[in-house]
Image (cartoon, coloured by chain):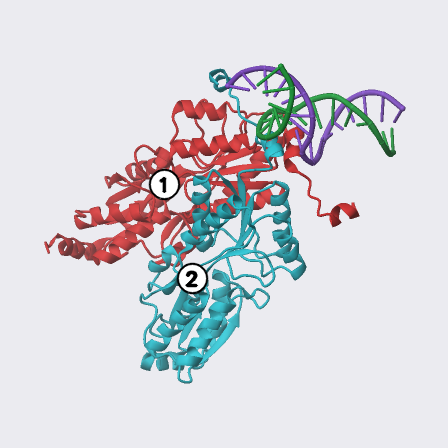
Chain colours: A cyan, B red, C green, D purple
DNA sequence: CTGAAAGCGCTAACAG
DNA sequence: CTGTTAGCGCTTTCAG
C-alpha cells in the first residue's frame, strides 16, 4: 500500500468497470447550464452525486433532439449508471422508446411521459401557474399575456394550463393570450418588443421562467414602458437575481437545488433495488411577491395613450 | 452492422479505454457552477469538447482543497484526458506538485504557477483592474474600497494590484482600501453592510466580480443608500444580468465563453503533440460603462451626513 | 486482405 | 484465509 502510494498508483477504472459493469458516473442533460435555473439544478445534482461517490457528466442539449440523442449514446457507451434529463418532450416517440428501452435508469425533470418507464421529479406546475394568475387577478388585471416556450416544446404546458384555467375559473371574464417564443432573455425581449409596441388592453405579462421575464424588462426599459406602473410582470423559478433586478421580480419559486438532489436520490434508489419501477416525486412551489406587480388603473391608460401615439 | 443496430449494440467504452488508454472525457473543476461566470465558462468548455468528441465531467470544488483533491483523484482514476481547473491557488505546494506530476494535461483558468507545468488561460487582470480604477478616477472619486476574495485565496491579486497601482499612478493622492471576503452575493452583502454603516469618506466600491457587486447593491438598497448618487459601484466579469440590474452595472467585461473554449483548444493541442510544454493564452478585457458610476460631489456629502446620524 | 489471438488491469470465483 | 486464474469486451498485432 505504501509503495503503491509512492509509485503514484491509481486504480484503473476502465478495468474495474469492465468487470463490475459500474462506472460511478451519472449523466446530466440540460438545455443550457447558463440558465441560472439549470445551474442551480446542476449544483443540486452534483452535490448529491458527490456524496454518493458519483461523478457527473454535464451535457447541454439546447433542446436539440439530435444533440440530445448523441449525448445519450455517448453516455450509455460510457456506461453511466443513470441519466437525468430536463426534458424528453423534444424527442420523437421512437427516440423516447429507444431511450426508455436502453435499460439505463432515467429521471426526467418534467412531467411523466405516457407509456415510458421514466422516473420524474416535477414541481406542481399547475399550482404554480395558478399562483401567478391569482397574483395578477388579485391586483385587478383583466387583460394578460402569457409568454411560454415554442409550440414544438410543450414543456411548460401544465404551467400555462394552470394559469389559463385559474383565469377562467376565478377571473370573472378576464382575458389571457398565450404567446410562444424562445425561453431565454432574447426570446422574452423579442416577444415583449412585439407586444409592447401595440399592447392594446394588456396590463400584465406572465412568463414561464424568470430569464424570459428579464428579457421583457429589458424591452420595457428600452421602450420607456414602466414596470409595474405601465405593465405588471410575474416570472417563474425565482432565480437568485430575481430579487435584485429593478423592480424586484414577483415570481413563483421552485426548489431548484432540491429538484437536482431529489433526482439523484431517485437514481440511487433505482440502483439499490432490483425493481426498475419508475418513481415520481413532485415538489412544491411558492409565490414570491415583490414589486413587479401592481394594480393596473389610470396609469395604465396613460401608458396606452402614450404607446398608441405614432412616432 | 444492421443486426448490431437491431440488437441495440453499444460499444463498451471501458473495454476500448482499457486498450487504447483513452476515455474521451475531460474534467472541469470550478468553484461553483451557480456563479454565472463559471456557468458561461462551462458552456464554452462543453461546446468545444462536444465538437471534438469529448464529454465533460463537472466538479464543484467550493474552493475547498480537500474536495478539489478528491475530485482530481476521481478524474484521473477515470482516465480523463485532461483537466481544466479554475484555480490551484487554494492548494498547498505539495498538492500542486502532485497534480502537476500526475501526467494529466492541466489547464488553469488563472495565472501560471511558478515551477509547475500547468497551461493557463487568463485575462489581462492587471489591465482589468486598471480599467475599473480609471473609470472611478475619471468620475472624480478620491476614496474607494476594493472588495476582493479571502486572504488565503489570492486568485484576484493581479486584479487588485492593477486597481491599486492605477490609483497610485494616476490618482493624484486618491485612496484605496482593500477588503477581503467571500466572492459571492452574501460576501458582497456582508462586506457592504459593514462598510456602508460607517462609510467615512468612501464614495465608490469596486469588486473583483459582478456577483459580489450584486451583494453590495442589495445591501445598499436595504440601507437606503442610493446607487450611484450616494455610492458608485464597478464590478468585474460582465455577467449577462449585469446590464439588467438597477442601475445597470458598470463593469469590466471578460470573454467567459472564450476562456472555456480556449482551455479546451489548449488541451486538444496538448493531446495531439507529443510535447508536454505548457501553453499560455491571455485574453483581453473591456470596460462596459453603464449607470452605476457617477461623480461623487454634493449628493455624497448628504449621504455621509445621513448615515452618520445614529438611529 | 481476412481471421485468430494476445493482452489491457482489474474483480470474483475457486483451489489450496 | 491466502494465492491463482479466468474473463470482462475491446484493439492491435501477427499469421494465414
Residue A222 seen in the figure: no
| Badge nearest the viewer, 2 or 1 | 2
Where does the image place residue B252, in percent across and percent down from the top left?
A: 40, 47
Are the residues under badges 2 and 1 in a single subunit? no
Task: Please name the residue that numbered disc 2 is placed on.
Answer: A210
Crowding at mark 1 (Cα within 10 Å: few <14, some 14-19, many 20+): many
Farthest residue in the left direction? B310
Give whichever of B157, A288 is nearer the camera: A288
Q: Chain of mark 2?
A: A
Where does the image place residue A302, in percent across and percent down from the top left?
A: 35, 81
Find the distance from the CA under tag 2 to the CA under tag 1.
Answer: 32 Å
Q: Quadrant of the C terminus of chain A?
A: bottom left
Where does the image place residue B287, in percent across and percent down from the top left?
A: 40, 48
Above-or-below relation of B300 to A129? above
Please give left or right for residue A146 compared with residue A251 in the image.
Answer: right
Crowding at mark 2 (Cα within 10 Å: few <14, some 14-19, many 20+): many
Task: Please name the residue that numbered disc 1 is placed on.
Answer: B129
Mark 2 lies on a secondary structure that is: helix
Residue A12 occupies which quadrant of the picture? top right
Where does the image place residue B97, in percent across and percent down from the top left?
A: 45, 23
Above-or-below relation of B151 to B276? below
Amino acid at each position: 500500500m505504501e509503495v503503491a502510494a509512492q509509485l503514484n498508483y491509481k486504480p484503473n477504472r476502465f478495468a474495474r468497470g469492465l468487470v463490475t459493469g459500474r462506472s460511478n458516473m451519472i449523466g446530466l442533460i440540460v438545455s443550457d447550464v447558463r440558465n441560472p435555473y439549470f445551474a442551480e439544478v446542476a449544483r443540486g445534482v452534483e452535490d448529491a452525486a458527490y456524496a454518493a461517490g458519483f461523478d457527473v457528466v454535464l451535457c447541454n442539449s439546447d433542446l436539440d433532439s439530435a444533440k440530445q440523442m448523441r449525448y445519450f449514446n455517448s453516455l450509455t457507451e460510457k456506461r453511466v449508471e443513470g441519466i437525468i434529463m430536463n426534458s424528453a418532450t423534444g424527442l420523437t416517440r421512437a427516440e423516447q422508446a429507444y431511450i426508455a428501452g436502453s435499460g439505463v435508469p432515467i429521471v426526467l425533470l418534467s412531467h411523466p411521459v405516457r407509456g415510458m418507464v421514466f422516473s420524474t421529479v416535477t414541481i406542481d406546475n399547475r399550482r404554480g401557474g395558478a399562483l401567478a394568475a391569482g397574483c395578477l387577478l388579485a391586483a385587478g388585471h383583466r387583460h394578460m399575456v402569457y409568454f411560454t416556450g415554442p409550440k414544438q416544446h410543450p414543456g411548460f404546458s401544465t404551467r400555462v394550463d394552470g394559469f389559463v384555467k385559474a383565469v377562467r375559473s376565478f377571473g370573472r371574464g378576464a382575458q389571457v393570450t398565450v404567446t410562444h417564443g424562445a425561453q431565454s432573455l432574447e426570446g422574452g425581449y423579442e416577444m415583449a418588443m412585439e407586444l409592447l409596441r401595440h399592447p392594446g388592453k394588456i396590463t400584465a405579462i406572465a412568463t414561464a421562467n424568470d430569464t424570459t421575464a428579464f428579457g421583457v424588462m429589458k424591452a420595457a426599459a428600452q421602450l420607456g414602458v414602466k414596470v409595474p406602473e405601465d405593465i405588471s410582470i410575474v416570472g417563474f423559478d425565482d432565480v437568485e437575481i430575481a430579487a435584485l433586478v429593478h423592480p424586484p421580480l414577483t415570481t413563483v419559486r421552485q426548489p431548484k437545488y432540491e429538484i437536482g438532489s431529489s433526482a439523484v436520490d431517485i437514481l440511487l434508489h433505482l440502483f439499490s433495488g432490483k425493481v426498475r419501477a419508475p418513481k415520481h416525486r413532485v415538489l412544491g412551489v411558492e409565490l414570491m411577491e415583490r414589486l413587479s406587480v401592481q394594480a393596473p388603473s389610470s396609469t395604465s391608460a396613460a401608458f396606452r395613450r402614450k404607446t398608441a401615439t405614432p412616432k
